[in-house]
Amino acid sequence: MIRREGARIVLSGPVTLANVAALLEEGRRHLAEGVRAVDFGEVTEMDSAALALCLAWLRDARASGGGLTFSNLPESLQTIARLYGVHGLLPLH
């Protein structure tokens, strides 16, 4: 689930392969409306699809000339990013 708070969205609940496609599209709508920050503080479950989601949103934000930051990334997600060699691509807030 995504909740909007100004120029920030807050993800809550699971972020897994089962729901990532819907989150991707909903997040893209928010990005198009000026969202520039994503908070993972309320995520309850995730898998590597969460990393793919971050990278897709980051690519979309940059393609439209904007920036995007991530906050409260779970340590497990940061570990996956390090294992894949993409940790440096994620702008953390």
Image (spheres, rainbow, N blue to C red):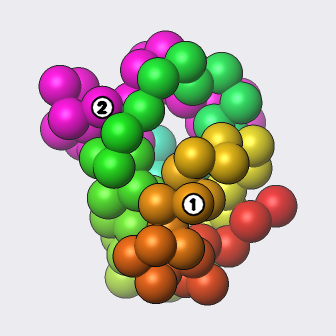
Horizontal relation, residue 65 to residue 93: left or right: left
Disc 1 residue type?
Thr
Whole-percent x, y for residue 22 in the image: 22, 30
- Give the image quarter of residue 3: top right
Q: Find the residue positioned furthest to the right.
A: 93
Any mark on residue 16, and which?
A: 2
Q: Is residue 18 visible?
A: yes
Q: Nearer the viewer, residue 81 or 37?
A: 81
Quadrant of the rendering where the N terminus is positioned: top left
Q: Which residue is mark 1?
A: 79
The kind of residue tagged 2 is Thr
Q: Which residues are magenta?
A: 1-27
Quarter of the image for the C terminus: give it.
bottom right
Question: Up-down: is 33 above or below 22?
Answer: below
Where disc 1 sits, the SS reads helix
Q: Vertically, is 9 above or below 87?
A: above
Give the residue at x 46% y 73%. 83
| Magenta-colored stretch includes residue 67 | no
| Nearer the observer, 23 or 13 | 13
